Image (cartoon, helix red, strand yellow):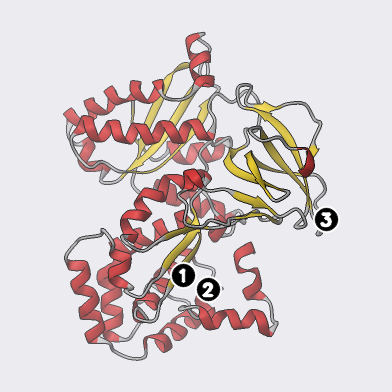
Amino acid sequence: MAASSFPLHSSSNPNRSLFMSLSSPMEVILGSNVEHQMYCHLLCGLRNSDSIDAIHVPYAIGLIKAMRVLESKWKQLCDDIEKGFLCSVINDVRMRDSIVEVLGGPQPDLSNRIRLIFEKKDWGGILNKLWPNVRYIRCVTTGSMKQYYSKLKYYAGEVPLVGGDYFASECCVAINLDIKQPPDLTRFVMLPTAAYFEFLPFDLAENNVVGEETVDVCGVEVGRMYEVVVTTYRGFYRYRLGDIVRVVGFYNSSPLLEFVMRAPKTSYEIVTEGDLMAAMENFQLVLRNTMGMAIEIVEFTSSVDFSSSPKRLKIFIEVKDCDMILQDKLQESNLRKCCSDLEDSLGSIYKVQRNKGEISPLSLSVLKCGSFDRLLKLAIENGTPASQYKPPKIIRNPSIVDVLEENVIVTI
C-alpha cells in the first residue's frame, strides 16, 4: 500500500473526511489499474474544473504522466463529458458507476469549452486554462524529480509550483519551510522526533561512505554529505534509506538539509545519479542546438555492462517522436556527434576511469516510445505502489535491462 494512500484506507471518520476535498471518488482513488485511475482522475478534474483550487501529486513524474495522457486522450475525455458516460475502455464496474455519478449527465457546454482550449494546441500554461481557479501545484521536484521541473513550469504557466516535504516510506525525515523555492534552492529542516536519525559520512570523490561510524543529529557538520540512517517507531533498526544529503546549516538546532542524490550501491559504480542527471540536462541542450529542432528526451536511465571488456556504461533514452527523428539519416548522424559531448560531461569518477582505459566507450540506445511505461508496469506487478514509483536512473537488475534492450531502436 502506498504511504500516500494509507490514510484513505482507514475506516476512521477523520481520514474518511479527506475524500470530501478530493475531486475523484473513493472507487477511483483506491482502484488497481493505474492507467484507468489516471484517466478517471483527469475526467473528474475536468468535470469539476471550476471548483478545483489546487493540484497535489506525490512526485513530479506523476503529473508529467497525467499530462501525457491528457495530450493523447483529450478528445475521448471531451466526448465522455459531452455524453455524460464513460468510454468502454474502463471496465471496472464500481469505478464506472462512480464516474457516471460525478459526470451528472451530458455536459455539452462544458465539453465544448474544454475542447476549444485543446484545439488551440497551445500547451503552455494549459493547467491554468483548464482549471482557472487553481492557486498552486504541489509535488516533490528535488532529487531525480528535478528533471521534470522545467516541463512542469511550462504546463503550469503562472500557477506557482510549490515543493513537497522530505518523506520516505519508512518515516518523515524533514519538512520544507520555504515551498516556493526551485529544486536547486530547496532546503529541508530535520524533524528529530520523527525517528532516531544517524548519519554515515559520505565522500563524493570516493563515491562511498567513509567507514561505518555514524554521527547523530548533534554531530553533523555544515558542508559535509551523509547517508541517512533511521530507527523508526514501527521497528526499522538502523535502516539505511539510501539517500545522500548535504548539511547546509541549521534551523534553530535542527540540521538544514539539501537532497543530493540516491546513494550508490557500491564504490565500484562509475557514474553517480547526480552526474548522470547533469550530463543528460546538458545533452538535451546540445541536441537541440545541433539538430535544430525542439527534441525532447522523455526519460532516461543507465546501466553498466560488465560482459564487455572493459566494462561499458550504457545509457537508454526515450525521445518524443523518435521515429520521425531516426528516419532522417542526417539527424541520426548528428545524434552520433552529440554522444561525445555527453561522455565528456559524465563527471569526474567516469572521466578518471575512462582516461585510464578501464571503461569502454559510452553506448547510447534510443528506445521505442512507451518503453519506460513498461518498467512502471513491471514495478507495479512486483508490488511497488504507482504513486511511489520513481524511474530508476541507474539500473542494476539485469532482467530490467533486458526489458529495455528488447525495445531498442538504434544503438550509437
Residues marked 3 and 1 touching at CB (< 8 Å): no
Task: Name which of mark 1 and mark 2 comes first in the sequence.
Answer: 2
Say what amino acid the circle numbered 1 marks. Gln
Percent x, y for residue 388? 57, 57
Say what amino acid the circle numbered 2 marks. Ile
Percent x, y for residue 338? 30, 25
Residue sitting nearer the eye, 69 or 135: 135
Asked which secondary structure carries label 1, the reply is: helix
State the CA–CA distance, disc 3 to disc 1. 33 Å
Q: Is residue 297 above or below residue 130?
A: above
Q: Residue at x 37, y 90 (%)?
A: 104
Residue at the spot of label 1: 37
Residue at the spot of label 3: 235
Asked which secondary structure carries label 2, the reply is: helix
Image quadrant of residue 164?
Answer: bottom right
Residue at the spot of label 2: 29
Residues marked 1 and 2 touching at CB (< 8 Å): yes
Say what amino acid the circle numbered 3 marks. Gly
Q: Is residue 359 above or below residue 184?
A: above
Task: Name which of mark 3 and mark 1 comes first in the sequence.
Answer: 1
